[in-house]
Amino acid sequence: MVLREVNSSQAKAGDVVKLMVDEPFQTKGVTIPAGSPAFGIVREAKDAGAGLKRGRLEVQLTYIAVGDRQLPLTGELLDKGEGGKGDDAAKVLLAPIYILFARGNVAKLRAGEIVYGQLAPQPNS
């Protein structure tokens, strides 16, 4: 689960994204309790821009912390600013000059949003 909103207008590559395990689970004899901190890193963040240019956000999951162990994760979180061709077409028809100045929507991971990843395969497992 995402702890704090991350959006493409404020995030930058290399920023750490804080997550939390929302349900306990067990894998290969290791119990991962609910509330365990997990982390990701922003790989790409492109802000929305004029001409309805939509934002883009890409986060790579990195690990879950369990006690003094860091269990590697695989997975990525991707988002593009909302809206679509129909929405854009309506704006062009209703106010053509508006398009030159209108910003597209930012991409975001909302606080409380549930995301999914997998534990990375461990050597010799």
Image (cartoon, grey):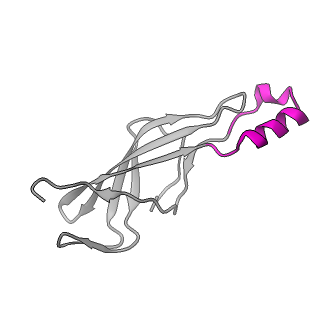
Compared with residue 57, is residue 51 higher up or lower down, i.e. above or below?
above
- Report the side of 123 relative to 11 (left or right): left
Quarter occupied by the N terminus: bottom left
Q: Please, which residue is most extreme toward the right here?
A: 94
Residue 108 or 118: which is nearer the viewer?
118
Residue 16 or 95: which is nearer the viewer?
95
Q: Is residue 32 visible?
A: no
Residue 56 or 70: which is nearer the viewer?
56
- Report the side of 35 relative to 113 (left or right): left
Residue 105 rendering spot, x and y as whole percentages: 66, 41
Q: Quadrant of residue 101?
A: top right
Residue 62 rendering spot, x and y as whole percentages: 31, 49
Residue occupying image coordinates x 86% and y 26%: 97
Residue occupying image coordinates x 49% and y 46%: 78
Residue occupying image coordinates x 35% and y 53%: 39
Examine the structure image and report whether residue 102 is included in the region drawn in magenta.
yes
Query: What range of the chain is rendered magenta?
Result: 81-104
Compared with residue 61, is residue 97 higher up or lower down, i.e. above or below?
above
Q: Is residue 14 visible?
A: yes
Compared with residue 107, is residue 37 higher up or lower down, i.e. above or below?
below
Examine the structure image and report whether residue 89 is included in the region drawn in magenta.
yes
Residue 83 rendering spot, x and y as whole percentages: 70, 44
Residue 81 rendering spot, x and y as whole percentages: 62, 43
Q: Quadrant of residue 23?
A: bottom left
